[in-house]
Image (cartoon, rainbow, N blue to C red):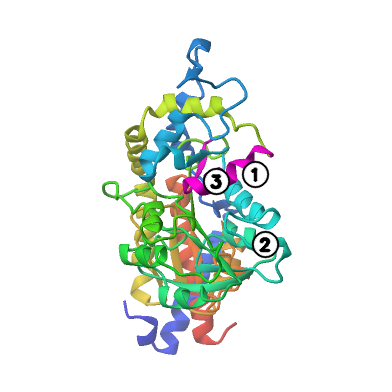
């Protein structure tokens, strides 16, 4: 099949009419398909069903001298902290266990910067005239929502194949009002980018003008390979320490896409000095998070190796779904040359780049045909995609049959939006 650039106007029109006819059939089918969020599907949730039936003997609720049923141990059960420490390559004393959502911990760290200031803050952020935050994009919409909620000025920086554009970032941090940066270093949301060692080294060696510059290192997909073996990653805490920036970074992770998203365990990791400071602030907020849930996770996994074994079972569920997405795009869209996408080996998303100026139209067409996707522009600060090009495909939640149907609709919508633009119909 020739690309659209090689077609005559008559050929483009014929292709458009055929796609429109198929699209109308899809609309009449009354579909209700959801690819909007990176939610685990039922098969993935079932992998952790033994936790629902787990009996914990009252005589086994004491672990490392800590009674899981009672008050105390603000930082969480030591055994749970050890599992996260082993997975992330950090020291146990650098791990703080939270509730079910790392997003909650991220929000809390930012909130405390505003209400109290961070360890090296000269003033609490709420007193400052301006707070700017670097936002590599496309990126995670909820990071941007946190920044916007606190009134930060978000600075969009392009995300390249090996991580954010460090030439731009190294210049930006010379401004003392630039207070931090969001990062998803492994299988980034949505592009699936893995930061290279060179990029991580440059990030760790930043020389920000702000003494309390905050590196928000959201390692949400650190063990989430769906193709191939587990890929080790750099310990950002140690990299920052060696670079002379030991207190610059907070790292986050959770079991949200490992066990149950609504009932998992999260953590943040930071330097011992940061931990001493943050514990004083957290002590006013909570006596401890749910240690019985932490205990359930410890008994379920046993160790970090148990987590990695569990993730292989997740991979066996996810890989076929990503194959469905990529095969549909390769078969239906690639020959026409009207979109591009990355082929991740882990994470939860496929990042799709349709013809510039067409993402919102594709999204609207999908919605009209009963396919729900994350909104166009959501992967950029202020929802402003400068090219109106990026869409995030989330394959994990629908069953394979529904996913295949959703991809059929999406491919038709990509064609229609592109052909409308080329034919001057919109």
Residue 41 on image: x %, y %: 48, 42
Q: Can you identify the residue that label 2 sits on?
A: 123
* CA–CA distance in space, label 2 to label 3: 26 Å
Where 35 sits versus 18, above or below? above
In the rendered image, residue 210, in percent from the top left (x then y), is placed at: 56, 68
Residue ID for mark 3? 102
Few, some or many residues within 10 Å of mark 1 (<14, 14–19, 20+) = some
Name the residue that disc number 1 marks: 281
Q: Residues within 10 Å of mark 2 (few under 14, many from 20)?
A: some
Boundaries of the magenta span: 264-284
Please determine whether, in this image, residue 386 is positioned above or below residue 240. below
Q: Secondary structure at mark 1?
A: helix
Q: Residue most toward the left?
A: 229
User: Helix, strand or loop at disc 3?
Assistant: helix
| 281 inside magenta stretch | yes
Q: CA distance from mark 2 to mark 1?
A: 16 Å
From the image, state whether disc 3 or disc 1 is nearer to you: 1
Residue 270 left/right relative to 308: right
Q: Residue at x 57, y 84 (%)?
A: 425
> Magenta span has 112?
no
Q: Residue at x 53, y 80 (%)?
A: 420
- First in sequence: mark 2 or mark 1? 2
| Quarter of the rendering occupied by the C terminus | bottom right
Specify which label sits upstream in the sequence, 2 or 3. Answer: 3
């Amino acid at each position: 099949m020739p690309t659209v650039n090689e077609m005559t106007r008559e050929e483009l029109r014929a292709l458009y009419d055929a796609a429109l006819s198929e699209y109308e059939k899809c609309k009449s089918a009354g579909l209700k398909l959801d690819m909007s969020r990176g939610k685990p599907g039922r098969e993935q949730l079932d992998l952790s069903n033994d936790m629902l039936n787990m009996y914990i003997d009252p005589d086994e609720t004491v672990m490392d001298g800590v009674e899981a049923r009672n008050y105390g141990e603000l930082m969480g059960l030591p055994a749970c902290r050890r599992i996260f420490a082993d997975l992330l390559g950090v020291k146990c004393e650098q791990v703080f266990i939270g509730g079910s959502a790392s997003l909650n911990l991220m929000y809390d760290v930012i909130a405390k910067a505003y209400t109290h200031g961070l360890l090296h803050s000269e003033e609490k952020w709420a007193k400052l005239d301006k707070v700017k935050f670097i936002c590599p994009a496309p990126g995670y919409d909820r990071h941007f929502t946190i920044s916007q909620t606190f009134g930060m000025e978000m600075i969009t920086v392009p995300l390249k194949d090996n991580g954010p554009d460090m030439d731009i970032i190294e210049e930006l941090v010379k401004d003392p009002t630039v207070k931090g940066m969001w990062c998803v270093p492994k299988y980034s949301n949505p592009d699936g980018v893995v930061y290279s060692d060179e990029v991580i080294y440059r990030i760790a060696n930043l020389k920000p003008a702000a003494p309390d510059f905050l590196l928000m290192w959201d390692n949400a997909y650190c063990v989430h390979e769906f193709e191939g073996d587990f890929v080790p990653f750099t310990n950002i805490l140690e990299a920052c320490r060696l670079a002379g920036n030991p207190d610059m970074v907070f790292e986050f992770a959770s079991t949200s896409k490992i066990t149950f998203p609504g009932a998992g365990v999260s953590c943040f990791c930071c330097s011992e000095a940061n931990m001493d400071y943050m514990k004083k602030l957290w002590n006013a907020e909570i006596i401890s998070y749910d240690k019985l849930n932490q205990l359930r996770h410890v008994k379920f996994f046993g160790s970090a190796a148990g987590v990695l074994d569990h993730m292989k079972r997740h991979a066996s569920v996810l890989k076929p779904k990503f194959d469905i997405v990529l095969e549909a795009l390769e078969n239906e869209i690639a020959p026409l040359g009207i979109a591009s996408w990355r082929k991740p080996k882990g994470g939860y998303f496929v990042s799709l780049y349709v013809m510039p100026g067409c993402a919102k139209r594709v999204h609207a067409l999908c919605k009209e045909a009963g396919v729900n996707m994350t909104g166009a522009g959501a992967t950029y600060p202020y929802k402003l995609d400068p090219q109106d090009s990026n869409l995030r495909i989330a394959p994990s939640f629908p069953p394979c049959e529904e996913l295949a149907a959703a991809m059929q609709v999406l491919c038709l919508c990509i064609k229609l939006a592109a052909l409308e633009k080329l034919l001057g119909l919109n």
